[in-house]
Image: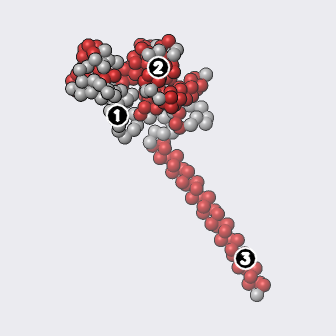
Amino acid sequence: MKKKKKSNYTNLRKVIKVAGAVIAIFITLLAISVYMVAQNDGIIGKTADWLEKAGAPVELEVPPEYIEIYQRAEEEYGVPWTLLAAHHRVETRFSTMETMVSPVGAEGHMQFMPCTFVGWSHPTCEGLGEGDIPADEMKDPAVIEQYGGYGTDGNGDGIADPWDIEDAVYSAAHYLSKNGAADGDLERAIFTYNQSDEYVEDVLYYFNQYEDQLN
């Protein structure tokens, strides 16, 4: 009986060892699979050179295709490009949100209310600023100038479109510049963009992270 009991104990140890090995292999394969999916989706390896430092959280990565746009907008309006990146990250997660129309009607890559984009003196603008602005007026730089809006033709195609990434970023830079960002008053500019203390904290968090990566 004792001999049989010892044999059962030995067999049990073997089973545990085999199970442990199988689990270890499974975890390794799962990790490799997650890594490959992330690579294919552009999550890993999509960071710009300035952000490619060990341990940089995925949430802090700025898609490199946008950086030149931010930088050109900075040259035009004097707003730090890292601030534009932070706004873009907070507003639409770098344009990756399923829908880029907010519950109150803000739209596009940088989430402009139509009346802010075209101008609050437009006859349909009131309340929160959703307005009832015809599509052709919404994108017309001459109409925007007439009504004092912030919509900007960033790519020089004669249209100011909040759904065009260049126009949206330039419009955001225009707005932030006029509200203090170009003079260093970032908090006031951010709060004017979206009147929420939490929003200001979120934007400043990413702005500071991006600035830290540059130093």
In the picture, the disc for residue 9 is 3
149 or 122: which is nearer to us? Answer: 122
Q: Is residue 3 above or below residue 198?
A: below
User: Amino acid type of disc 2?
Assistant: Ala
The mark closer to the camera, 3 or 2, is: 2
Q: Is residue 66 left or right of residue 162?
A: right
Q: Visible in this render: residue 167?
A: no
Q: Is residue 110 left or right of residue 201?
A: left
Question: At x 42% / y 14%, what residue is drawn?
Answer: 178
User: Amino acid type of disc 1?
Assistant: Val
Q: CA distance from mark 1 to mark 2?
A: 21 Å
Q: Visible in this render: residue 8?
A: yes
Q: Is residue 174 above or below residue 132?
A: above
Residue sticking out furthest to the front: 127
Q: CA distance from mark 3 to mark 2?
A: 71 Å
Report crowding for label 3: few under 14, some 14 to 19, many 20 or more residues within 10 A (C-alpha).
Answer: few
In the picture, the disc for residue 104 is 1
Horizontal and vertical percent position of residue 63 = 46, 31
In the picture, the disc for residue 189 is 2
The mark closer to the camera, 3 or 1, is: 1
**Callout 3: helix, strand or loop?**
helix
Report the quarter where the C terminus lies.
top right
Question: At x 34% / y 22%, what residue is drawn?
Answer: 116
46 or 211: which is nearer to us? Answer: 211
Q: CA distance from mark 3 to mark 1?
A: 67 Å
Horizontal and vertical percent position of residue 199 = 48, 30
> Which circle's residue, 1 or 2, is located before the other in the chain?
1
For the residues bearing labels 1 and 2, Cβ distance under 8 angstroms: no
